Each structure stands twice: as structure tokens, then as C-alpha cells.
Image (tube, helix red, strand yellow):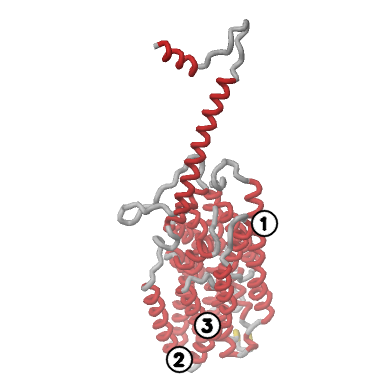
Amino acid sequence: MELTIIVLLVIVLALFFDFTNGFHDTANAMATPIATGALKPKTAVTLAAILNLVGAFLSTEVAKTISGGLINEGGDGVLITPELIFAGLIGAIVWNLVTWLYGLPSSSSHALFGGLIGAAIVGAGVAAINGGVFLSKILIPMVAAPLTAGIVAFTATKVAYAITRRHDGKKDGRGRFRYAQIASSSLIALAHGTNDAQKTMGVITLTLVAANLQEPGTGPHLWVVVACALAIAVGTYSGGWRIIRTLGAGLTQVKPAQGFAAETSSAATILASSHLGFALSTTQVASGSVIGSGLGRRGSSVRWRTVGRIASGWLFTLPASGAVGAIAAAIAHTGMIGVIIDAVLGLAFILFIFWRSSRNKVDHSNAIPAPDVAESGYAVRIRKGKVKPPKTKTGSVKPLSPVAQTAIRDDEAAKEAAREAARQAALEAERAGDAMPGGYGPIPTARAQQQQQEGDR
């Protein structure tokens, strides 16, 4: 009876972690299309939620890595108990919520791994961890994936700008990439479902195996797949707007061609890793792609201070979540009373974080300032698009920012220059008119005839 209660607690906590994973990682797919105006904020998160749900059913390779590879098996079965898994999930959730509060796109995946590893070491010793799997499928991808995605995004951005250079004479001339962004960001959301939702599937499967309710080496049951898919989809729909602000506007100013290159690079990296069973961080991949695309667009700048903050979060994710997981495991190891203490402390912390976040609320209306979206849309508008001042909730119109005002003045100056050039061309045509045959002089122009008629009056 006691074991059944603990298993149920672990499943509930695992699904809550899946929910936090969803809203923590929405930015991976939708920050850049929101920043460029390719998708409206609520439309973007709805689309991401649906595709995360679909992606969760496409593969289970990553789930098998967690449930059957990371934690070793001993003579009595897997060297971790449901109590320790419960403690590891607490470590992962605590780190997820702390980084979300400060808008840091840290890795939910590595928070989960850190929490599980810390709890397993406390409960079963270092021998409980499969060092080969940890190195080859977690640690190496953690370093290689963002670098690979960044290099690919840098190259793709260079190519995109080289082959579409100012083809329509507008400020940026690449507005059609906004439509391509819808496809590329959708692909990331689908890829995120194939990778991140599986991690929770693996945790629940590991719990069932540890409790002798499932055979070792088997994949997740259908009900586990469905529950995890729904949890991550609901979390994705809730937004995670603080991290969308950081990735969409905090690292670099994103233009459509640049965003398309970053999203395509991220999706390719994530899908390839899911196929190989690498439990990489989709957040690190997306961040690396945005940075690479920022370096690849001439004239753009990367905010290296923000990059440093994000990198610090990456560096501390495994040890910090591992430390929290280890402390929670030491408490849970005392028995059922310890599990209850962990549950109460964890719930109190979750409530505190959400209360603290309400003091500085970030949602779809202010995650990325509307004037920035309007200017970005202006810079890449197609044909005769115009700048439209964004409306407030009350219906009033905000004044355009200096950037947009300058863009409007440039357009007016260009139009006036074109009109003046046309007038000069007409005058030159009048002065250089060809003489009529027979020596009758130059052919009178329409303007000369009008002036003569006015003189005759």
C-alpha cells in the first residue's frame, strides 16, 4: 500500500515536471516567430502545444535511454527506488522554476538528469550511475549540440542573406521568410515533442520498473505516452513568456531570414538527436542557433552579457539540481514521513515561486514589446506594406518609436526623390526632342502646347 502511494506521488510529480518543461521550453520554437511578427503570441503557443502533443507519439528512443540506460541495474533490480526518483523530480522542478522566474532558458532535461543523479548517488552510491551512458548520451551532446546548432545557423544565415540580398528594394527585402518561419518553428515544436516529452515517459517507466510493476528493458506503456503528451502540451500552451522575452529579444534583434535559419538548424539538430537517442537540451540547441544566426547577419549584434548569464545557468544546472535532489533524497530515505516532508516543502516552494512571479507579471501582451514587432514587420514588409502603430488594450494608438519614425521618413524621402527624378527626366526629354523631318523644328511636347495655348489666351 505504501509503495503504491509513493508510485502515484511520483507519477503526479513527473507529470507536473512535464508541464513545467512545456512552458519552460515554449520559447525554443516560438520566440523568434513572435519577435518578427510572423505569428501572433497566442497563435504561436497554441500551434506549439498541438505539435508537441503530436510529436510525443512519434518516438520513444530517448525514453528508453532514461528508463533503461542511465541508472544501472543490480542483483535486486534497478539501483534506484521510487522515493529517490521522487526526490530527483523535486530537484528538477525547483531548478526549472527558479530559472523561469529569472527568464533564463536553462535546460529542463539536464535539470531532470541532475536531480535523478543526485538522488541516486545518495540512495545507492556512485555505482548506480552508468558512466558510459552519462558521458556519451548526455554530457557530450550537452557541449556539442549548441555548438553544432550555432555553426549551422551561422552558415544558414549567411547563405540566406547572400541569395536574397535586397531583391525587392525594401529595408530588409526578405519579408517572405516570415511565412517560412511558420513552417520552421512548427518543425521545432514537433521535434521538441519527440525529445522532451519522452524524458518524463522515461522517468515514469523507470519508476514502474523500480517498483517491480514493469519488466526491465521495456518501453513506456501507451497510457504513459498519452499522459506525458497531454501534460507537455498544456504546459506549452501556458506560454513561458519570461523565457520567450529572453530568446526573442534579449540575445539579438531577430529578422525573418535570420529566424528561419535558426529554427531550421534547431529542428534538424533535435530530430537527429531524437533518432539517435541523445537526450540533449532543446533549450541549449535553440539558444545556440539564435546566437549563431545573430553572428551570421551582417550589422546585427549579440548581447554577450545575456549570453554569459545563460551560459552560467547551463553550467550550474546539473550540479544545482543534483544538490537539491540529493538533499530531498536524504530526507525521503527516512521512509514515508520523509516523502511527505519533501512533498510539503516542494509544494510550498512552488507556491512561493508563482506568488513571486505575480509581482512582475509577464504574459503574451508584454513578453516582446509591440512596437518592436511592428518595426520588425515594417523592415521586412512585402511590396507596399505600411507601418501601423500598435493599438493598446483600451483602443488608443501608441506613438511609433524613433526607429519606426525614421523608417517612415526614409520612405517619404525615397518617394520624393523618385518623383523629382521623373520630373527631371520629363524636362530632359523636352529639351532633347528630335527635330521633325523637313526642318520644321523640334516636335512640340504636350507641356509646350499647353503653355502656348495659355499664352494665346
Residue 27 in picture, x, y percent from top left: 50, 64
Q: Is residue 390 above or below residue 110?
A: above
Residue pointed to by mark 3: 88
Q: Mark 2 Cα within 10 Å, few/some/many (few <14, many 20+)?
A: some
SS at badge 3: helix
In front here: 285 or 431? 431
- Marks 3 and 2, the one that precedes in the sequence: 3
Label 1 element class: helix
Residue 155: assigned label: 1
Amino acid type of the residue tagged 2 in the rendering: Gly
Circle 2 sits in a helix, a strand or a loop, which is it? helix
The residue closer to the viewer here, 436 or 120, is 436
> Measured from the top left, where is residue 278 in percent x and y?
64, 70
- Left or right, 354 with reference to 7: left
Residue furthest top as drawn: 438
Q: Which residue is mark 2?
A: 338
Residue furthest out toward the front: 455
What is the spatial separation of the Cα atoms under label 1 and label 3, in whole angstroms? 39 Å
* Residue 175 rendering spot, x and y as whole percentages: 54, 47
* Disc on the earlier residue, 2 or 1: 1
Q: Residue at x 42, y 15 (%)?
A: 454
| Farthest left residue in view | 394
Q: What amino acid is at disc 3?
A: Gly
Cα separation, mark 3 vs mark 2, equals 14 Å
Among the two numbered marks 1 and 3 on one chain, the one whose residue lies closer to the N terminus:
3
